[in-house]
Amino acid sequence: MRVVVADDVLFTRAGLVRLLAEAGCEVVGEAHDLDSTLRETLVNRPDVVVLDIRMPPTHSDEGLVAAARIGADLPGTGVLVLSSYVEPAYAMRLIDDHPEGVGYLLKERVSDTAVLVDALSRIVDGECVVDPTIVARLVGRRRRTDPLDVLTEREREVLALLAEGLSNRAVAERITVTERTVEAHTKLIFQKLGLDADPLSNRRVQAVLAYLRSAT
Amino acid sequence: MSTVGRLVVWSAVVGTAVALALVPRSHERLTTYASVSPRLAAADVVAALALLGACVVGLLLEPARPGLVALALAAAVWTTQDWAGWYDGPQFVATVGVVLAPLLVPLLAHAVLAAARQLRRMRAPLTALYAGAGVVAVLHALFYDPFLDEDCWNTCTIKNVLLVAAQPDLGHRVAAAWLLVTAITGAALVGLVISWTTVATRAAVRLRGPAIVAAMVLGGVLLTQSVARWRRPRVDPRTSLDAGLYLALVVAVVLVAAAWAYGPLLDRWTRRGVAHLVRGLGDAVAAGTVARVIAAATGDPSVRVVYRLPSSGGYADAEGRHVDPPHYGPGALPVLRDGHELAVVLHDPDATGGDAVRSVMGTALMLALDNERLRSEGLAQLADLRASRARVVETGDAERRQLERNLHDGAQQRMLALSFDLRRAVAGARDPEARTVLASAEAESRTALAELRDLAHGIHPAVLEEAGLAPALATLADRAPVPVDVQEDLDGRLPPSVERTAYVVVRDAVAAAAADGSQGVTVTLTEVAGDLVVEVRGAGPGPFRSVEDRVAGAGGHVVVAPDRLRAVIPCAS
C-alpha cells in the first residue's frame, strides 16, 4: 500500500513513517504543511494519505481542508486524519467533505500496528473509520431520558461498532456472530431509534453520529 | 481696563464735550464746515455725539472692550477741526487742532476694526497707519506754516506756535503722501469688507454686520476724499462736492460709532439669553449642554467644549470620549480655575472672537461646565476601565490559547513519540519481564496522553475557535457530568470574544449545576437585537462571580435567578 505522510512535527512524522513501514506500507512521500501535502499527493498518487489535522500555515484545520481537496481532486484516494482532539464535529465534517474512504483517529491509536493496518485497509475499501474514543463518548453521553435505553446491551455494542464505521461483516467478526445476526441487529436498532437504514457504510455512519450527537 | 486707559477715555469724553460746548461754530468767516450752514454744523455735532455716545455705552457695559480708547480719542480728534478753525481763540489750541487732525484716520480705522473683531489680525497695518499719522503730525507741528500754504482755507490766519522752520515744499510732499496713505487705508478697508463677506457665516454676519457696513462706508469715504483732494487740493466747504464729502464722512463716523457700540450691546443681550438658558440647567442636563448654550449665545454652531482629564492629562468630550488635545491659538479658549485648565472652548475664530465666548461664560454657565466636566471625567474613566477590563480578558484568552498550542505542539507530541517508541519496544522485546514493564510503560504513556489532551482542552477548546460555539458546546455536553441540552439557532459565527465568553458562561454554569447535583441543564442561545442571550436553565442560584466578571468584561451583564442564569453579551464591538 502506497502512503503519503503529512505532519509538521518532525519526530512525530518520523515515528509515523516507521510505524507504517512496520505495518508493511510503502511511504512514497512526506509533507509538513497543507501545500506540500497536496503536492506530494498529486505527484505520487498514493492509495492513502495519512495526515495531521493541525498543520501550517494556520495550525487549525488544514488536515480537514486537505481531505476535502483530495476528495474533490483525486476521488478514490483514501485519507486518514490523525488528531489530538476528541471532537465529533471534526469527524463528521470529514465524512461530509470526503464521504468515501476516510478515517479520523486519535494519533496514539496508530501505535498499535494492527489498528493501523485495519484502518488503512478499510479506508482503501472505501469505508469510514471513526475513532472508538469519539464513539464511546457519544454513546456514553449523559442524557435526561436516554433513547438508547430501548436498546439491549448487545444492540448498543453493535451500534457503537457501526458508528466506528465497521461493515456488517467486520462487526460480525468483532463480536463473533454471523453476518446475518448483525444484519438483524442493525435492522432492529434502526427501527427502535427511528433511523433510515442505509446500506452505504459512510451514510450509515453519518446518520448514527448525527443521531448520537443530537439525542439529549 | 487700566487706570491710565480709563483716565484717557474719561478725559477724551469730557474734553470733547467741553470742546463741543465752547468752540464757536457759527460766524461770518469761513473757517470750519460748521460755519458754512446750520445743516453742516448739526452734522458736526451729530458725529461728535455719536462717538461720545458709543464711548458712554462702552464705559457703562464693558470698559475693557478693545477699541474704546481709540473711539474716545476719535471723538476728541473729531473736534480738532473746530479748534483749528477757532480763529479768535488761543493760537495754541488752533495749532493742536491742526497737528492732531491726521490722527482721525487711524483712530476711526482702529474703532471699526475693533467693531469687526479683527484687531488681532490687523495689528501690524494699523500700527503702521498710526506711525504714519504720527509722522505727519510731527512734521506738521515742526515745519507747517499756514501762512505759506496756498491751499489753506480754515487755518490761513493761524500762527503755528510749534513751528521751527517753515518748509512749504516739505509740507506739500507730506500732504501728498498722507493723501496716498488715506487712499490706501480706504481701499484696504473696502478690500477687507469684501474678504469678510465672501466667507461670512450666518453667525459672522450677526456679529459683524454693522461693522461691515461701517467699514465699507468709511473706506469708500476715505478713498473718495483722497481722490477729490488729489485733484483739487484746496477745500471749499461751500461747494456741494466738499459739503457732500463732509456729510459722507459724518455718516461714516456715526456708523463706526454705532458698529462699535453694537458689540457690547450684543454681548449684553447674549448674556441675558445665556442667563435665561442657564437658569434651566439643573443637575440632570444632557451632555453637551454647555457647548449648545455657548453656540446658541454666540450664534456660532461650531462651538465645542473639551474637558481636561486631570488623571491622564488628556481630553474628553462631554460624553467622556477621548479626543485629541486642542491646538491652542485663535479659536481655542482655555477655561482656567486657580491656574488649572478645566476645559477648552473651541470655536470658529473668524465668526466668534474669544471675547465673545468669554462674555457668555457667566457664573451659572461655569457651574454647568463644572458639572459637565466632572461627568465627562467620570465617563472617560469608566470607558477606560471597561476597555482595560476587556483587554485583561482578551490577554487572558490569548495566553490560554497559546498555552494550549504549546501543549499540543510540545508535550503532547513528545509523549506521542514516546508511546510510539514504547509500542515498538514492546513488540521487539524478547525478555518476558522486560516486555511486561514496557507494556505497562506504554499504557502509562497513553493515559498521560489522554490526561494531557483533557488538560489542553480545559485550558482552551481548540474547536471553539475553529468550528464555532455550537460544536464546542456539543462537545462540552458530551463530556459534561450532567445531561446538557443545547438549543441554538445561531446564524453563522459570532465574534471570537463573544463565542469565548458564551462558552465560559455555559462551562461554568454546567460545572456549578453538576456540583449542585442538578438533574440536567438546558442551554439556549439566541441573538436578540445585536446581543447574544445565553440562558442556562437548571443552573443556579450561584454565586457566579467569575461568570459575571467575564460577561461584564465583554460589556454585557448577567441575571441570576434561583433556577437559571441569563447572560446578555453584546455582539457589536
Image (cartoon, coloured by chain):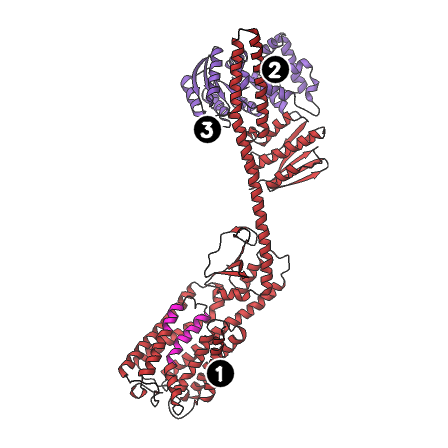
Chain colours: A purple, B red
Residue A215 placement (x, y as % from top left): 65, 24
Q: Nearer the viewer, residue B406 or B346?
A: B406
Q: Residues within 10 Å of mark 1 (few under 14, many from 20)?
A: some
Residue B472 placement (x, y as % from top left): 59, 29
The reply to whether the magenta stretch includes residue B158 is: no
Whether residue B402 is visible: yes
Residue projecting furthest to the left: B169
Q: Nearer the viewer, residue B289 or B77?
A: B77
Q: Secondary structure at mark 2?
A: helix
Identity, as a three-letter code, of the amino acid under mark 2: Leu
Which segment is the magenta one?
B101-129
Residue indicated by mark 3? A57
Q: Which mark is residue A161?
A: 2
- The residue located at (44%, 78%) in the rendering is B73
**Real-space CA distance between mark 1 and mark 2, rounded to the nearest whole angstrom:** 117 Å
Q: Nearer the viewer, residue A101 or B523?
A: B523
Q: Which mark is residue B14?
A: 1
Left or right of B37 on screen, residue B511: right
